[in-house]
Image (spheres, grey):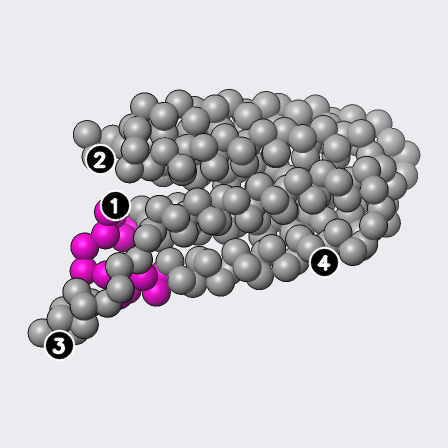
Amino acid sequence: MRKIVKMISKEKCDFYQLLIKQTELTCSAVEILHTYCSNDDSHLIDQIVKLEHEGDFVRKELIDGINATFITPISREDLYSLSGSIDDILDYTRSTAERIYDFDIAENASILTFVEELQTLTQALRESVISLGISHDAVTESAIAVKKVENRIERRYRRAVKRLFELDDIKEIIKLREIYRHISNAADKGDEAADLLCHIVIKAV
């Protein structure tokens, strides 16, 4: 009983704003990654790492809110999973930047194009999350846009990997494939988030 009273009496957690904040941090990190891909400035990685740490803090705040809130606007499981998928995109954005730095990769047109697509994906994801609790149609429309971009990235990934095996430098093949994989994984998490958003809408109608 005490636990229930405590949960009700706590300051209300704005889950929608926390999810929006996560997507904004992710969009910012991908923007910086895009800049880094065409501007070899290692200080940009520090900015991405800072955003990733801030994203972890926001996710923790959301999880704490779930645990402390008696009634949530959408199911606890959906909140937790959606937040986790967004956080994973941010994690992969950081790991992509770190791999580019660690492998000493020069400016690469394929990577730049991948990241441009990832920018489009994260911006659409942000629009979908912003529409939560406002417009089911807008949530779904933007979520579908996310899935379309993910499909493009996946096709581009397969073509890029195929081209890699035309190279003679085994080390270069391994390095680039690893970077491509991290960007592809980020897109997969975007697709996962889009599915969750559509699922949330279906449960709400």
Which residue matches tag 3? 2
Mark 3 or mark 1: name the one nearer the start of the chain: 3
Magenta segment boundaries in residue numbering: 63-77
In primary-sequence order, the first of circles 1 and 4 is 4
Which quarter of the picture shows residue 151?
top right
Query: At label 1, which amino acid type do we have?
Result: Ile
Write the residue at 81% across / 54% down. 42
Tag 4: amino acid? Asp
Residue 14: x and y, percent?
Answer: 32, 53
Q: Can residue 54 be seen here?
A: yes
Distance from label 2 to label 1 (Cα)? Answer: 9 Å
Whether label 2 touches label 1, CB < 8 Å: yes
* Residue linked to disc 1: 74
Three-letter amino acid code at the position of disc 3: Arg
Secondary structure beneath dot 3 equals: helix
Compared with 35, 97 (above or below) is below
What is the crowding at mark 4: few (fewer than 14 residues within 10 Å), some, or many (at least 20)?
Answer: some
